[in-house]
Image (cartoon, grey):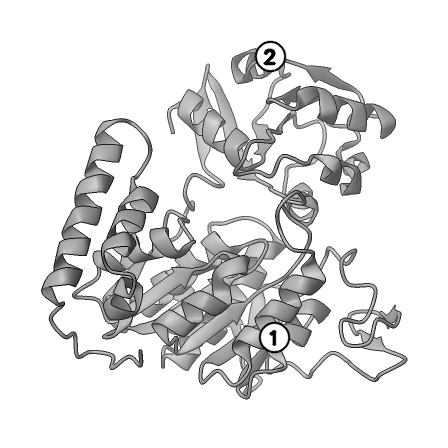
Amino acid sequence: MAGHPGSAEPLSPRSKLAVTAGKAAAAVSRAAGRGSGSVIGGRVALKLDPDLLSRLATHLDVVLVSATNGKTTTTRLIAEALGAAGPVVSNALGANMPAGITSALAGGSDAKFGVIEVDEKYLAGVARDVTPKAIALLNLSRDQLDRAAETRMLAEKWREGLSGSKAVVVANADDPLVVWAASSSPNVVWVAAGQEWKDDAWSCPSCGGVMQRPGDDWFCGECGFRRPQPSWALSGDYVLDPHGSAWPIHLQLPGRANKANATSSAAVAAVFGVPPQVALERMYRVQAVAGRYDVVNFLGRDVRLLLAKNPAGWLETFSLIDPPPTPVILSVNARGADGTDTSWLWDVDYTRLAGHPIFVIGDRRLDLAVRLEVAGLDFRVCDTVDEAVQMAPPGRIELIANYTAFQDVRRRVGN
């Protein structure tokens, strides 16, 4: 269903009923203490009107954001940037499958822009439904090994789904899998955003040959598939735009990965007519994203909360924590939302934590303890976050947790 931004048509009686029922279901879920209710609300609404998502997006200029890491943060940065040009509706809490997206858009009848985070597996379907003006593709790496498609298959799905898309695809030129996926699209803006985790892209996604990686460049020596020339780039603390102008990045969010997210966000904002200077200035307002990067006071100690869900995410997180002897608490669960397979722990280079006092908590603390033992690190296994915080030596504590472990910790520390 093609969108006509700015011309919100009244919803049909059926669609109105679906929206009302969805909001009621969400309210019941919240009252029962079962979270925001956005997913159950969206499911109820889509049951009553299967085309509701496309109807709700009709009047919006939509950007979709998909990746293995950084989706939620980048969605938030883009939403902040586009706010300079008009009202924005967004699934800011990260409910990124069709039900959660439907719930978010149901509250956006007055919005001009829809900034939507989309789970990698649902990108092609959601893109069909909402006719986006832009799609941001940040990275692809292994995640949720028990149920996610292998990364190469996911890249192939993206490639098929984006083939012939009218959207401007803003894609990371440094990730070969993303480049392969985006190359089927006729209108791509390439961004040099970097790629620290390379272990999912040593073979060519085009022919299977061995990828050559001299410096920051990459190419396949067998079929000639290679890194495209980017028009936007992250250079130190600056975003370089297509005209060669350098714009300073001032973020309250830590780490190089977030500067990369800001670079991609500035490129997306430009598609909608928001200049880099305006976009980047607005991004400074973002202090935390759904609790990530928040510093909380718990049991008299400052604890910084960091989310890392997979090997690529853990690698980026290790690069932004304070140096030794800063105490570090690691928490890993393996519930449904995390993926129940913890074999990925063996892909993470935990030797980067050498010199830090380490405390291990979470449902799978013993799995993690075995991994740290093999890495030759000193650590202590604790039953609760309270115990770990009380045992940690002085100084601000860095707490790194995967998805449900992060939610557990946030509930416990009152954030």
Which residue is rendered at x = 35% and y = 51% of the image?
100
Question: Which residue is identified by label 1?
Answer: 159
Whole-percent x and y of residue 181? 63, 73
At x 45% / y 67%, what residue is drawn?
Answer: 125
> What residue sits 64% from the left and 13% below the top?
382
Task: Say which residue label 2 marks.
Answer: 383
Q: Residues within 10 Å of mark 2 (few under 14, many from 20)?
A: few
- In the picture, which quadrant includes the N terminus? bottom left
Could you classify mark 1 by the number of other residues whose Cα lies within 10 Å: few (under 14), some (14-19), or many (20 or more)? many
The reply, left or right, for residue 242 in relation to residue 215 is left
Q: Does residue 248 appear in this view?
A: no
Q: Left or right: where does residue 287 sit relative to residue 258?
A: left
At which x and y percent is residue 255?
59, 51
Relative height, residue 254 to residue 109 (above, below): above
Name the N-terminal-most of marks 1 and 2. 1
Task: Decide if residue 201 is in sight here.
Answer: yes
Position in image of residue 118 (x %, y %): 46, 59
SS at mark 2? loop
At 79% from the left and 27% from the top, the residue drawn is 372
> Residue type at mark 1?
Arg
Q: CA distance from mark 1 to mark 2?
A: 45 Å
Quadrant location of residue 366?
top right
Q: Which mark is residue 8?
A: none
Judge left or right: residue 291 versus residue 213. left
Occupied quadrant, residue 175 = bottom right
Depth order, front residue of 88/277: 88
Rendered position, 190 above or below 89: below
Indicate the amino acid at tag 2: Asp
